[in-house]
Amino acid sequence: MHARSPIPDYIPNVIKGQEEQALDGQVLLNIDPVTGEQLCTVARSGNADIERAVAAARLAQSEWADMTPVSRGDLLREAALLMRDRSEEFAEIVSLETGKSRQDARGETGAAVEMGLFVAGEGRRFFGKTTTSAVPNRTSLVVRQPLGVAGLIIAANTPIANVAWKVYPALLCGNTAVMKASEDTPATAWAAAKLFHEVGVPPGVFNVVQGFGPEAGAPLVEHQDVDLISFTGSCDVGRQIQASAGARLAKVCMELGGKNPLIVCDDADLDRAVATAAMSAFSNAGQRCASGSRLIVFDGIYDRFKEQLLEHTQGLTLGSADDDDLGPVINQRQLENMIAAVERARQTGATVLTGGGRLTDDAHRNGFFMMPTLLEGATGSDEISQAELFGPIACLYRVSDFEEALELANNSPFGLTAAIHTANIDRGMTFLSRIKAGVASINGATYGSEPHMPFGGVRQSGTGWREAGAEALDVYSDWKTIYINADPTCV
Ligand code: NAD
């Protein structure tokens, strides 16, 4: 353990409110992305642990569902408020696990708290429908009902936000949950589960199982007693999960990758566009599904934009201090994948303008620090333009006009977020209507979702569901249509 670290040497599962080792005693190592040294060991769960967690969730479900949504919301609000009281501790855990600065981790924790408060309030709305009937004296209603046990599988990039985005709405809707935390960020989910129990969420309602995807995630997906799988992660894994859960006709919500375009028109505020493009591409070390990795720039301002962005990028500092601009990527494998992808792009004709490799100076060489990287000269259909890299890497594209920009922006298997920088309202409105994306913005970044607004993508970025906002309730509940014939003799 680090001196006074909130992360213990061993991170267990949390099942039925109890901390448990993996039943066969196996562990995996969690590596500090800043130093490359061991941070802690983690329960390496398998089938038997998933069995226990799902059984605990099933046992707790009907009593939890019997509470009113208002009462569940009240408990969830307590959890959000305690999370706010402990936000320094959560920020420290997030910062230690991911290598991002404490300041960035504080922002992420604040967003998780806001999500909790928003969802708690939904317990007092929880709108259904009342409508008319063709039959006299009959009342027709549509109300929400829980699904049962929710299997929640999350990525590592924003660990406390990823926990909050799923757990709060899943529990509000009357489900119990088994979360498979990311193997790279186990402590955040562990600390969150303990906090939920502390405020009185009953044992078995929120369980956390640690471990690798194929060993602990796959059995959760395949489990007959899991009614919903809500997954945030890569398309490759998403495809496997969709196929496996689809075989047993389970409900599946997929929040997947992005290769998000940011268009800079010749009438844009150039300084703002440069700063926003850099934030979209490099903040959180580019480990955002909503990061801006394709920067599509009008010919007339391309050279000036490139020069300014290059200068900005080369001035970024890497590290985990609050005055650093970006931290490491999450693990060695991701780092190596990125370096290899940049190398392949170079070989197929792209030019690396800056970055392209690992930081190797004394302060960074043991961590997983990818230099912020800009390329140009790739075509829209090259691998580097089509595949998500999930790191601080962006490509610049030169286009002659709006039509070419829009065509390039839409030339992607993904459709998560998109942005345009322009002073022309008509151009902006045309972009909003024709861009294929779940989230689109004018004169803003490609990221930055708010808890009360739905978030999700089209095409391979998702399967049509939205997280956050009241729309998240549609993921975690099902509709029940009700007819009441109060006095059957009058019907
Ligand atoms: P990943 O797909 O490798 O892993 C995500 C989770 O799935 C992890 O917990 C992992 O252990 C688990 N997993 C892996 N194999 C599994 C299997 N066979 N069965 C069940 N579970 C399995 O993704 P990652 O590298 O951790 O995260 C990056 C990806 O997440 C990017 O593609 C990013 O765009 C995406 N993401 C999407 C959103 C969104 O809201 N759309 C948000 C954040 C991240």
Image (tube, rainbow, N blue to C red):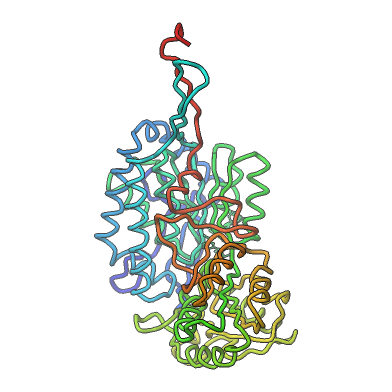
Residue 373, image x, y percentages: 57, 85
Residue found farthest to the left: 85
Residue 384, image x, y percentages: 67, 77
Residue found farthest to the right: 348
Residue 45, image x, y percentages: 52, 53
Q: How many marks?
A: 0
Q: Is residue 171 above or below residue 317?
A: above
Q: Is residue 142 above or below residue 223?
A: above
Is 336 or 137 nearer to us in this picture? 137
Q: Quarter-wise, where is residue 176 in the image? A: top left
Q: In which quadrant will I find the N terminus?
A: bottom left
User: For this view, does 84 lie left or right of residue 432?
Assistant: left
Residue found farthest to the top: 489
User: For this view, does 368 lie left or right of residue 299?
Assistant: left
Q: Is residue 230 above or below residue 102?
A: above
Q: Residue at x 46, y 34 (%)?
A: 145
User: For this view, does 214 lie left or right of residue 22?
Assistant: right
Q: Is residue 212 visible?
A: no
Is 313 or 25 nearer to us in this picture? 313
Q: Residue at x 71, y 82 (%)?
A: 344
Residue 232, image x, y percentages: 54, 57
Q: Quarter-wise, where is residue 94 in the image? A: bottom left
User: For this view, does 109 lie left or right of residue 297?
Assistant: left
Quarter of image, ligand 1: bottom right
Q: Is residue 369 above or below residue 430?
A: below
Is 132 or 302 nearer to us in this picture? 132
Q: Is residue 139 visible?
A: yes
